[in-house]
Each structure stands twice: as C-alpha cells, then as structure tokens.
Amino acid sequence: MIEQRSTLAALVAACMVTAFATGGFAQQAAPPPAVLVQPAELTPVAEQAEFIGRAAAVDKVELRARVKGFLGPRKFSDGDLVKKDQVVFTIEPETYQATVDQKMAQRDSAQAALTNADLQLQRATELLRSNTGTKQTYDQRLSEQLQAKANLEDAKAQLRDAEIQLSYTEIKSPIDGRIGRASVSPGNLVSPDSGVLATVVSESPIRVLFPVTQRELLEAKRDAQIGDPPQVRLKLADGSIYQEKGKLDFIDITVDPKTDGQIVRATFDNKDNLLTDGQTIRVILEESKPQKVVTVPQQAVALDQSGPYLFVVDDKNVVHLRRVKTGIVRSGQLVVTEGLKEGEKVVVQGQQRIRDGMTVAPNPAPAQPKQ
C-alpha cells in the first residue's frame, strides 16, 4: 500500500514538472494599464494681474436740513431711485411762508415810499427851475428819494432771503440716484445740526479704485506704449466674472509712502446696478491681445519635491516622465512655458498606475466643454 502511494506521488510530481516545462501553469503577463491622453494645445491666453479694489459712486450726496422746523411726511421709500430736484423731505413751511408775506409787505411799502419820494423830488426840481423853490428844499427831496431807493433795495434783499429760507423747507435730491434709508422720522424737530437725513448715490456709471505698486505701474506704462491699453474686468464675490468691461481713466498724482503704491481708477457703466458704492471687489487687468501658448488640463500636472511634472506618451505607447515649467491657470487649462510641445500626448487620467518607461494602453480623453 505504501509502495502504491509513493508511486502515485512520483507520477504527480513528474506531471507537474512536465506542466511547468511546457508552460501549462505559466502565469500570463498582465495587460498594459489603460490611461486617458490628450494632446497639448496652442491656446490664446492673455496675461492677467489681479488687485483688490473698492467701488465708489461718481456722485454721493448727504441730505441735511438747512433750516429749523418739524419734519413733514417723507416723499420716498428707502432704496428708491430718485430724480434730480425731486422733493424727498419737507419741513413745516408755515412760519417761513409768513416771513415771506411780511417781507413782501415791507417791499411794497418801500416801493410806495420811493414813488412818493420821486414825486416830491420832481416837484422840488420844477419849483427850483421857476425860482419859486429853494435849493435847500431840492437837496432835502433828493436825499429822501435816495434813502427811499436804499430802503426798497433792502426790502427786496430781505424778501429774497425769506424766499430762500422758505425754499429750504423742501429738501430735494441734487442728483439722479438711489436714496438710502432715512435716519430721522417725520414729526421730529430738525435743524442744520441734526446730521444726515439720508444719502443719495449715483450708481450708473460707477468707479472702481484699486492700489497698484510702482513696479506694476511702470510695467503697465511700458506695455501701453507698445500696444493697446489693458482690458479691465471684475471678479465678483461669488467668483464669477462681471460681463461688463471697464475703462481706465485716472491715476492718482501722488504715491502713498506707506505702501509705495498709487490709486488707479476704472469706470463701469453699471447698467444692471450690480455694483454698489463701497463694495469690495477684485479687479483684473488683462492684455488686450492674447498670445498663443501651450496648455494642458490642470489635472495632467503633478508636483513633487523636484517641481511640476507630467507623463507624455510616445508613438510606441511608452510613457515618459517630463519635467516642465508652468504658468497661469485659465478655465481649467494650465499654461506650460517649458518642457512640452504642441501635439504631444499627455496623460490626463490614470497617472497613479504608471511609471516612467512603462508601456500603456492610451485612449483619447473625452472632449471638455469650453468655459
């Protein structure tokens, strides 16, 4: 029995040796890893510089009381658009109207006195010519006529002042714009010392102010001499780009010694009223004429201690690790300034499964929508 088992084991061993020798149990080679590739492209990209700015209204007016009195009904709702010369507040006018009426009466009285003085002077002149009057009387009537003229001018001036004070009982907006919330409720006593009643700001157009360092300003001036001025764009708080383009129209004439920068101003039409006075915003200065540069999807480039790199697939489907120099990112595309040529196939997915010199199974990456 023992002899049969030994014979059987020997037969099994011989079969296994034969199988290995003939490759029956040989391990099959693993297929090359699949990767997604995309050719490097020449893409027009404009150089950009980004700054922190603040929106500022072209016109901003603080409405204040110019006479003393009780505030009447409000003529607007907070946040309304108001027109130039539109009445927004009223102050009780009765006292000032009474003063105007009184000054009108004084003017009329002075006018009557002047008319009488003119008649008296005319009579004194006629009597003096006929030698029936005296020179002293004539001089007296002339003096009275001149005094009556002065009294009339004074009465007119007082009436004009009273009319001006009456006009101040209607507080009007001096500009077209949007009015803020009222700080004083109707019925309160107001005066020139009461402070700001409300503020009106013009929203269209609107300005954006941002500081630029001396180095950046010098570079911009040199570029402007050899080409078109840069385009001005805005990045909103949610990261989106404001569709409207602005225009640079002013550079401050002094340099801030603390920051070594100057304030630059851009103006936007702001027809949609999306920009608000005081709003913090990012300003983007962009070259007007983009240059074509080599770009790859941002996910194709990795970074290690030696710097950025990517994988390139050659005609024999062999991958090569390529050290590159990179630039800015625009709409998910990374600019490669050195180390890559247009048309070279770059691995954009599957890098974690490959290494330098490995054969791969490349497949074209699906086309990405243009942003």
Image (cartoon, rainbow, N blue to C red):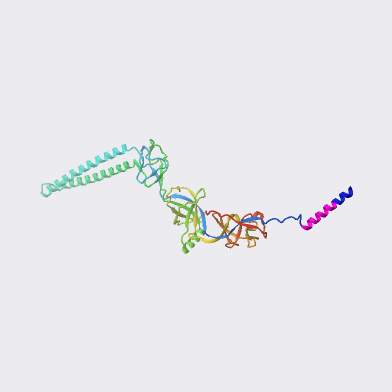
Q: Nearer the viewer, residue 178 or 364?
A: 364
Magenta region includes residue 35: no
Magenta: main secondary structure: helix
Magenta region includes residue 17: yes
Q: Nearer the viewer, residue 99 or 45?
A: 45
Q: Nearer the viewer, residue 120 or 311?
A: 311
The total number of labels drawn is 0
- Where does residue 366 sit, x and y in percent of width and height? 57, 54
Residue under the point 28% across and 40% down: 100
Q: Nearer the viewer, residue 326 or 44?
A: 44
- Where does residue 334 sit, x and y in percent of width and height? 57, 57
Is 151 located above or below residue 244 in the figure? above
Is 278 located above or below residue 317 in the figure? above
- Where does residue 76 sit, x and y in percent of width and height? 38, 40
Residue sitting farthest toward the top: 187
Q: Is residue 319 left or right of residue 19?
A: left
- Where does residue 102 sit, x and y in percent of width and height? 27, 39
Q: Is residue 203 left or right of residue 10?
A: left
Q: Is residue 338 left or right of residue 113?
A: right
The answer to which image quadrant residue 80 occupies is top left
First to last magenta residue range? 9-22
Is 228 located above or below residue 75 in the figure? below
